[in-house]
Amino acid sequence: MLFTDRADAGQRLAVALRHLEADDPVVLGLPRGGVPVAYEVARTLGAPLDVVVVRKLGVPYHRELGFGAIGEGGARVISDDIVRRSGVGPDEAAAVERAEKAELDRRARRFRGDRPRLALRGRTVVVVDDGIATGSTAAAACEVVRAQGAARVVLAAPVAAPDAVARLSSRADDVVCLSVPAMFRAVGEWYEDFTQTSDEEVVALLARAAGPAGRTAARGAGGETAEEVEVAVEADGVRLAGDLTLPGGAGGVVVFAHGSGSSRRSPRNKSVATALNRAGFGTLLLDLLTPAEEAHRANVFDIDTLAGRLADTTRWLRTRTSAPLGYFGASTGAAAALRAAAASGTSAGTEIGAVVSRGGRPDLARPRLGDVRAPTLLVVGGRDTLVLDLNRRAQAELRCENHLEVVAGATHLFEEPGALEQVAELAQDWFTTHLGPRVD
């Protein structure tokens, strides 16, 4: 199997990892070459992306022989057997560890900047490289990630040497590799373009995955910050996971409903949420299905159930804020948002001030489209022709204030340069107009 470049390899690897979506994974790229591959995997899985920075501790007189490895957060893995057989003394081991710790810290700062390292405790972690030759770095990464508290470690690469895969099967809970050629000599032989990845590319990809502001805090009306907190919402007899950012004096709060094959940690929705936070809005990114429910494809198209849970969540949110409320829905999540908005202001619903649909399926909200009273903005990519046609037909059935905005040149996921930024700007303007003023 020959890959065009690391992006192509990552896209193909992501398909083989789609079964992990329900596990809400964290994706870690081995710098530098593993990060472009990991970026594509994280984007497909809707998972957060980070680097896993590890340093092998080499025997002083035989650096290729590692007696251990260290990682961020004080993670430390030592092979007592190799220390004993190699005769490495305590002072020598300490000197090696100090030198490697300094280099580890330098690289982590270079790649991540001021963003905090993602917490791994209790999570499923996917460690990604662009290829595996000997497997020594990948093995160290797996051990360090487990030492940082990961509940499950999955090692993934587009291509690997057969003997390396065999050795690594004992270091990871699962090894996913698209190609294990018998005549393996070097990773680069399996890529048409294997140009070296630069530090700058790693930094840019991590920043892009994190969103415009790294999604660390939102600014309130008085300039104070509000951290994103995980919440559990009781809805329809189940507990739904959400990420709530609620700055003081918020001009409004927007509830996000993601589409099929995604999660509340979708980098696309998180990017839009960050823009809204910076404009003074609160946000709640929500999973309307439990992980077990998401495993059954039919559930993601059960719009009645999704809408009912969104309405329950809206009532829960109303007990925590008096700010105007809006919905931002993507794909099937947009149908749930419109169906829930159709009950807005009735005895069964809470008043919704505005709805924005990104690449949505409003047609799935029939026959309740005519009952929606909240001002509705439909945003569709110009090259997403099928969904664009569905939105035009659905728009004709809306009786509320509405507008269809076509982002020229954009496809369904708005992956083109600048496309998602346009979506964020359109959503911000719509919610500012219909929910409240911008907070400067």
Image (cartoon, rainbow, N blue to C red):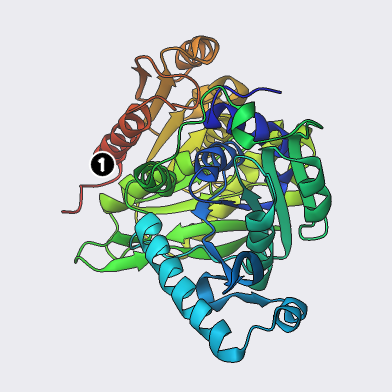
Residue 365 occupies which quadrant of the picture? top right
Question: Quarter of the image containing the C terminus?
Answer: bottom left
Residue 143 lies in quadrant: bottom right
Total number of numbered labels?
1
Indicate the position of residue 301 as horizontal and vertical percent values: 70, 31
What is the residue that sits farthest to the front in this orientation?
Answer: 61
Q: Nearer the viewer, residue 219 or 199?
A: 199
Could you say where residue 298 lies in the image, as x and y percent from the top left? Answer: 77, 32
Q: Which residue is mark 1?
A: 432
> As displayed, is residue 76 above or below residue 34?
below
Q: Is residue 23 above or below residue 433?
A: below
Along the line of sight, which residue is nearer the eye, 428 or 263? 263
Q: Residue at x 34, y 66 (%)?
A: 226
Specify the quadrant that holds the N terminus. top right
Label 1: which secondary element: helix
Q: Is residue 206 above or below residue 113?
A: above
**Residue toward you, 296 or 122:** 122
- Camera sees residue 272: yes
Of residue 181 and residue 436, the one placed in the foreground of this image is 181
Residue 433 percent location from the top left of the image:
24, 37
Whether residue 351 is visible, yes or no, is no
Assess disc 1: are there few (<14), some (14-19) or many (≥20) residues with their C-alpha within 10 Å of its C-alpha: many
**In the image, what residue occupies the spot 53% across and 49% down?**
265
Left/right placement of residue 40 relative to residue 281 reads right
Residue visible at 49% across and 44% down? Answer: 256
